[in-house]
Image: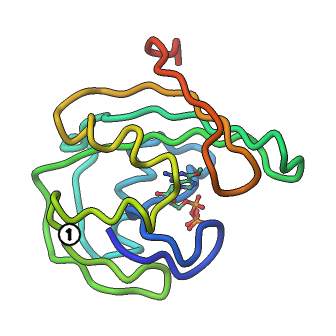
Amino acid sequence: MGVKKTGLGAGLVNCPGGKVEPGETPAEAVARELEEETSMTVAVADLTPAADVVFRFPDVPEWDDLRLHFFTATTFAGEPRETDEIAVDWIPEAGIPYDLMWDDTRLWLPDVLAGEFVVMDVDYAGRDKVAEYTRVPPRAS
Ligand SMILES: COc1nc(N)nc2c1ncn2[C@H]1C[C@H](O)[C@@H](COP(=O)(O)OP(=O)(O)OP(=O)(O)O)O1
């Protein structure tokens, strides 16, 4: 993970990622974004679904709802390299800087790192504070 340099969430610490392009699965998008943003590579088959989180921003009408598909992997190639998009590096689990990340991350990433698959709905108050959240059953698609 690292400091995102551009776009939504610039200045926050986040994991590599980005939007799913037409024709891609979320896992294919993760593999592509990881390589674009860090130069590391991972095979789609080596990605494990780890979280499915929907964010709503009712106070910010110009922001659409977002759905985040988060994956983990233990098999990959390369080492993180800073790019124009994110200043990535390895961060030890005990040092994850939740105070510098999207406010929702602290609600689900610890359970993901403990091995759970997390499905959650999160409503923000304004642009940067979680108002409420709910763990929900796995979605149909
Ligand atoms: C509340 O919103 C978010 N919370 C969390 N925890 N993570 C988020 C949120 N919004 C985006 N993210 C993640 C998803 C990705 O890992 C990164 C970047 O997402 P984004 O789609 O904004 O990335 P871009 O670099 O703008 O996309 P492209 O590379 O496709 O242009 O942050």
**Quadrant assignment for ligand 1:** bottom right
Q: Quadrant of the N terminus?
A: bottom left
Instruction: Give the image quarter of residue 121.
Output: top right
Q: How is the image coloured?
A: rainbow
Instruction: Give the image quarter of residue 17.
Output: bottom left
Looking at the picture, tell me which residue is in the foreground, 74 or 125.
125
The answer to whether the residue bearing label 1 lies less than 8 angstroms from the nearest atom of ligand 1 is no
Which residue shows up at 40% across the image and 86% down it?
83
Mark 1: which secondary structure? loop
Which residue shows up at 53% across the image and 22% down it?
134
> Residue 133 in the image: x percent, y percent?
56, 29
> In screen coordinates, is 88 left or right of 68?
left
> Residue 33 in the image: x percent, y percent?
43, 63
> Residue 19 in the image: x percent, y percent?
58, 55
Looking at the picture, tell me which residue is in the foreground, 139 or 12.
12
Amino acid of disc 1: Ile
Q: Which residue is mark 1?
A: 91
Q: Is residue 97 above or below residue 25?
A: below
Which residue shows up at 30% across the image and 27% down it?
117
Instruction: Give the image quarter of residue 27.
Output: top left
Total number of numbered labels? 1
Q: Is residue 42 above or below residue 85?
A: above
Looking at the picture, tell me which residue is in the foreground, 111 or 132.
132
Which residue shows up at 20% across the image and 69% down it?
91
> Residue 21 in the image: x percent, y percent?
59, 52
Question: Would you call the spot at circle 1 few (<14 residues within 10 Å), some (14-19), or many (20 or more)?
Answer: few
Q: Is residue 105 above or below residue 10?
A: above
